Amino acid sequence: MLDRILAFDINIFACFLLLTMTIIIRIKGDRHSYSSSLFLSIICLTIAALILEAATWIADSYAGSFAFFVNYLSNWLLVLVTPVLAGFWISYVDYKILKDRKRIRRLHFYQFGTYLVLIALILNFFVPIYFSVTGDNDYATGPFGWINNVLLYLHLIYAAVLTVMHRGKTNIGVIRGVMAVFILPVIGTIIQSFYNNFLFTWPMLALAVVVTYMFLETTSGTLDGLTNLYSRVKFDEYVHFIKERGELFGLIMIDLDDFKAVNDNFGHQVGDVALTEFARILKQVFRNERMVARIGGDEFMVVTYHDANAAGKSVTAVRDLMIRLKKIPALKTLRFSYGFIQNTPELTIDDLLSKVDHRMYDDKAKNKGIPPSNGRETPDRS
């Protein structure tokens, strides 16, 4: 038994690789987004396919009713998993390009091929159109067994076409990820056609998933290069994600006052030191919050679990800790203004960002002795 299992060491290695990658994603504590949820679904489906493929070959080498049952069931599920995985892959690419969650739902996560295959698999119980397993537990491809491969590659071609059609909205990471998922399984299929005793197709797809993760999920856009806080891109993704899920949260917008004068009078190097030190204070005070992000030059945003009172106490803690910056002579007078908004169902994300922006400016105006904006367009916030 052990020697038969070891014959599928490529599949076993691929499973451990994907499981390790999943653990790393969890340990990193990367913030959830819709694209990351789709990507984790792709990982789980790929692991399932690797296990099912190995199970079909192991069961095929045994006799008896139990081996027959395992062989038939694992082949049946493997056929079904293929279009499901392909549909989730297109959904992932679609969302990465167009950022439209409702569009993907309207398109049923591109599972139209799955519906067709499921009908065919139900018919396969009565007429072996997809595959058959004989009484001697021998597997044979049916007259329409080719449909699954055709559907898979049609999905991959569609993802490539979608990427090309929207190349103006597509970064190079998406293009590389799409090419990897298209090319590597093809290479695996070609190798397996010459060496039928070895399994390469699904392990190569697992490798494509790893490459996709490298290009699309670990991009430099996740973190701000200077402060190591989350970037504006990641902030936008995360806020859209929790808003669509109907979760409770608040936004604290923080803007450094007269920061342009620091850069003008002392140089950008001193300005960078100020931003880095201020970011460290924010991370210390808000370490248990949902997210701390740098969304602009001297603008920061905190996604918080708490209400206005708790947010005010945290802001006071930030001001108390800013004594650190007094060690740098040029930063002795550095101050900041802030605004807070609590999410409610009737407010859109644009509403939330607009309101918290105005409240931050009202605080800045109050600090300078200027009347509040009262909803007027926000002027320069230097």
Image (tube, rainbow, N blue to C red):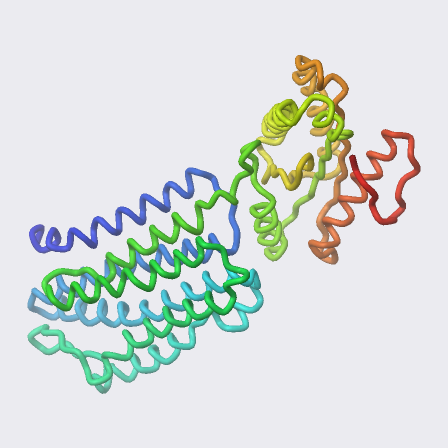
Residue 363 visible in the current orientation: yes
In front: 133, or 295?
295
**Residue 99 location, x and y as percent?**
56, 60
Nearer the observer, 250 or 216:
216
Relative to 8, is 353 on the left or the right? right
Q: Is residue 27 left or right of residue 234?
A: left
Q: Where in the figure is residue 309, as x and y percent of width and height?
A: 75, 34
Q: Residue at x 90, y 40 (%)?
A: 372
Question: Please, is residue 240 above or below residue 158 in the view?
Answer: above
Image coordinates of residue 30 in percent, x first then y, are: 48, 42
Please state which of residues 238 and 165 is positioned toward the viewer in this rendering: 165
- Say which quarter of the image contains residue 81: bottom left
* Vertical placement of residue 347 versus 251, above or below: below
Question: Quick check: 244 left or right of 344?
Answer: left
So how many labels did they put on this image? Answer: 0
For the point 43% across and 70% down, which residue is it? 161
Q: Quadrant of residue 338?
A: top right
Residue at x-position 19% and y-position 82%:
142
Residue 281 visible in rendering: no
State the image coordinates of residue 140 (x, y, percent, origin top left): 14, 77
